[in-house]
Image (cartoon, rainbow, N blue to C red):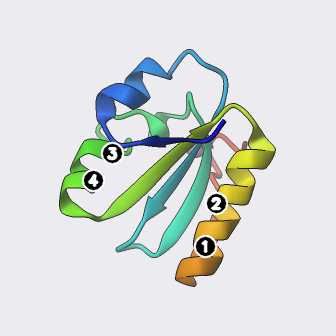
Amino acid sequence: MLTEIVTDEQLIKLYTTPGYLVAVDYSKEEVKLHTIDCMLADPISTIGVKPSKARKNKTGEFWFSESRDEANSKAEEIAQKRGINYSVCPICSP
Ligand SMILES: [Zn+2]
């Protein structure tokens, strides 16, 4: 099931649930697919995504799914709709 992540806390709670994060950055015009335990998908890390802030400033959106296919489909849909680049993260390479 696809779930929209709107707060950092929501994402932190998912850390031990195997799954995938679709991270959309409107300013960078990119969609990235991560495994949920990637350091770039960790709001606690200084280099990690910050869903609460992105939501507040309308700079991005985040989706979680336990299914890679489902996460991948959502990422492709967003990339196509917004005409932006989609790639998988080179660090966690999901
Ligand atoms: Zn990653």
| Mark 3 burial class by Cα count in 10 Å: few <14, some 14-19, many 20+ | many
Residue holding disc 4: 55
10 relative position to 54: left or right: right
Residue holding disc 1: 79
Rendered-image quarter of ligand 1: top right
Q: Residue furthest right?
A: 69
Quadrant in the picture for residue 6: top left
Marks 1 and 3, how far apart in space? 18 Å
- Which badge, 3 or 2, comes first in the chain's sequence? 3
Marks 3 and 2, how far apart in space? 16 Å
Query: Quadrant where the N terminus lies?
Result: top right
Verify CB contact (< 8 Å) between mark 1 and mark 2. yes
Residue holding disc 3: 51
Marks 1 and 2, how far apart in space? 6 Å
Q: Residue type at mark 1?
A: Ala
Residue 69 percent across, percent down from the top left? 80, 47
Residue placed at 55% from the left, 34% from the top? 38
- Which badge, 2 or 4, comes first in the chain's sequence? 4
In the image, is the residue at mark 4 within 8 Å of ligand 1 by its beta carbon? no
Marks 3 and 4, how far apart in space? 6 Å
